[in-house]
């Protein structure tokens, strides 16, 4: 299974303000951006639609970013992870141009879809799936982004900074 370069490392947190302070000191990241949703994500966990508010902050320099994930609402992969493991790294993410094909590839390696969702941000359509052997094993996030002009986005260096210019992200620090 080969997906390319890691786009970000996702860390589930309980409090964004504390996490920004902690990870700014630890990593030297001085600019953080919040993902802006056009509407709440349509999220499915364990095969059931869930009503969740997931706040995502991104920071980083160069190709790989750090994602801070703060969940609220119905039980989902993040709330369950926090309950079982506390705040820590949850997944590594890869951008893919065809999510359905990437999921088939992951399934051929023995992985299964643990959670999936879709949403829009600044007109871009985003779909993702978390795949792994279980929620207690290594988890990979596969993200397909279709830009408003119909082009599928792949790996883009400095993505957070570029997305802030298009309205996908709002600077928070």
Image (tube, grey):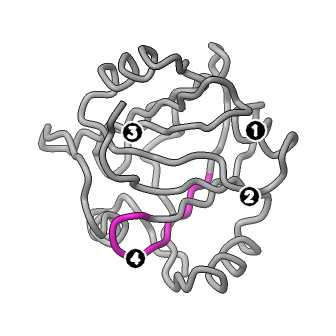
Q: Earlier in the sequence, mark 1 or mark 3?
A: 1
In the image, residue 82 sits, relative to residue 106, either above or below, namely below
Q: Quadrant of residue 113?
A: top right
Q: Position of residue 142 (x, y in %)?
A: 42, 36
Assign the N terminus to one quadrant of the image. top left
In the image, residue 40 sits, relative to residue 102, either above or below, namely below
Asked if the residue at tag 1 contacts the one at tag 2, i.e. Cβ–Cβ closer than 8 Å, the answer is no
Asked if the residue at tag 3 contacts the one at tag 1, i.e. Cβ–Cβ closer than 8 Å, the answer is no
Instruction: Report the span colored magenta.
Output: 55-64
The residue nearer to you, when weighing 160 against 25, is 25
Q: Earlier in the sequence, mark 4 or mark 1?
A: 4
Which of the two marks, 4 or 1, is nearer to us in this view? Answer: 4
- Badge 4: few (under 14), some or many (20 or more) residues near its Cα, within 10 Å? some
The answer to whether 45 appears left or right of 164 in the picture is right
Residue at position x 39%, y 33% from top?
Answer: 127
Q: Earlier in the sequence, mark 4 or mark 2?
A: 2
Q: Which residue is mark 1?
A: 73
Helix, strand or loop for disc 2: loop
Q: Position of residue 3 (x, y in %)?
A: 33, 39
Helix, strand or loop for disc 3: strand
Q: Which residue is mark 3?
A: 143
The answer to whether 156 appears left or right of 95 in the picture is left
Q: Which residue is mark 2?
A: 13
């Amino acid at each position: 299974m080969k997906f390319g370069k890691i786009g970000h490392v996702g860390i589930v947190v309980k409090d964004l303000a504390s996490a920004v302070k902690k990870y700014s000191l630890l990593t030297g990241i001085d600019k953080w951006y919040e993902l802006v949703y056009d509407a709440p994500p349509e999220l499915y966990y364990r095969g059931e639609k869930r009503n969740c508010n997931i706040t995502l902050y991104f920071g980083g320099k160069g190709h790989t970013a750090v994602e801070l994930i703060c969940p609220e609402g119905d039980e989902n992969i993040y709330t369950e992870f926090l309950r079982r493991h506390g705040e820590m790294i949850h997944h590594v993410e890869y951008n893919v141009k065809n999510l359905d094909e990437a999921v088939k590839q992951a399934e051929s390696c023995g992985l299964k879809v643990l959670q999936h969702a879709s949403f829009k941000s600044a007109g871009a359509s985003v779909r993702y799936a978390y795949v792994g052997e279980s929620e207690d094993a290594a988890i990979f996030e596969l993200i397909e982004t279709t830009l408003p002009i119909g082009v599928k986005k792949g790996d883009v260096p400095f993505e957070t900074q570029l997305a802030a210019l298009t309205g996908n992200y709002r600077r928070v620090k």
